[in-house]
Amino acid sequence: MGKERKRDLTEKEQLLIENYFNDKLNPAELKEFENKMKDPWFVEWVDKYRQAALWIDSIAEQELLKDLNMDIEELDPEEISKAFGEYPILLKKIQQLLNNKDQDNDQKM
Amino acid sequence: MNYVQAYKSGNFTQFSIKYLEYHRDDFIFSLQKWFPHCNTMHLNEACSQAITIFAENLKRGELYKLDNQGRVYVMAIAKKLLTDRKNSTMTNVANTCDECRKDDVKIGRDKKQLMILECIDQLNPLARKMLKLLLIDGKNIQEVAQVMNFGNFQIASTAKDKFILKLKNLVAKKLLEWERNESET
């Protein structure tokens, strides 16, 4: 036997889940959400909703991101050092990523 | 210093990085909800890249209005980086996150698209038309509001949120059914 779906989500529950993922719940709603999460049926719905929302948001957000340059390889190292001067850990991480990218490119050549 | 002062003084990028970096914990907290199987180090790497990409595009003048949209952009970029395995800039994060997401339902890209299309077709005609324009034709909400003769942008935007919520629920339901059928066969 497969898993039984107890019932569909109500509109209120849908909104509760959507707002949970978008950090829009007030303390009372968050408590309500946490209480509902004690039910495995609800947990399963939340997980499937999360996956569905990730797919749909990735399509919906294409418009938002379409003109952005997403390639950090093109960033000017000097500018990065300047901008991240006060954030040594972040700077180190970014430099690490750029170095890894360079190594990947070298290996491919 | 606020955004306008920062922009006028030419320190906009640095200011944005400071501002966004200050909110790093919030970003990680939010990303953890979306990627519960992904460890904090990978989320931090994606967050760092997203902040850098955002700031760089800001500097190039690609993003002219920030208000409170900075967070929206950084979250959207980080989510894209974590989900898009084929992105060439994501050598480390994407590969690892593929493993991190091993508990997610395994469905191919084509099947996913088909599932979303089937769910769009189950919606009412108005929702169907709007979501096809937005998700399939790639129009933005302003264009959709115009094409569909909405009185104003705000009404169209509210309708969009409502329809997308319904669509997510339908796709989630389909996923549950799909997983149930898979476990039966």
Image (cartoon, coloured by chain):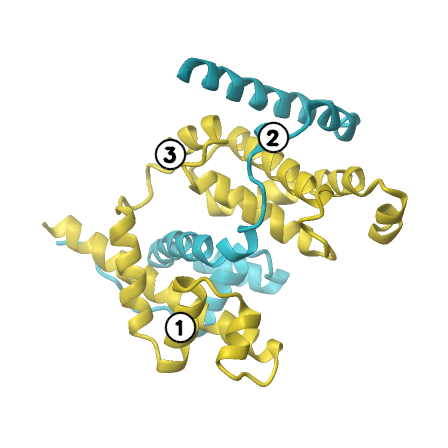
Chain colours: A cyan, B yellow
| Disc 1 packing (10 Å; few <14; some 14–19; many ≥20) | few
Q: Is residue B105 visible?
A: yes
Q: Marks 1 and 3, Cα distance to the nearest angstrom?
A: 32 Å
Q: Marks 2 and 3, Cα distance to the nearest angstrom?
A: 25 Å
Residue beneath disc 2: A74
Which residue is at 58% across, 28% downward? Answer: A73
Q: Amino acid at mark 3?
A: Asp
Please, which chain is the residue tagged with disc 2 on?
A
Q: Amino acid at mark 1?
A: Thr
> Is disc 3 placed on a helix, strand or loop?
helix
Question: Where residue B138 sits in the image (x, y, percent)?
Answer: 45, 62
> Is disc 1 placed on a helix, strand or loop?
loop
Q: Amino acid at mark 2?
A: Glu
Q: For the residues carrying marks 2 and 1, which lies nearer the camera in this image?
A: 2
- A88 lies left or right of B125: right
Q: Against B142, is B41 above or below?
A: above
Which residue is at 26% across, 51% downward? Answer: B110
| Disc 3 packing (10 Å; few <14; some 14–19; many ≥20) | some
Please, which chain is the residue tagged with disc 1 on?
A
Mark sitting on residue A10: 1
Residue at the front extreme, as displayed:
A109
| For the residues bearing labels 2 and 3, Cβ distance under 8 angstroms | no
Query: Which comes sooner in the sequence, label 2 or label 1?
Result: 1
Mark sitting on residue B98: 3
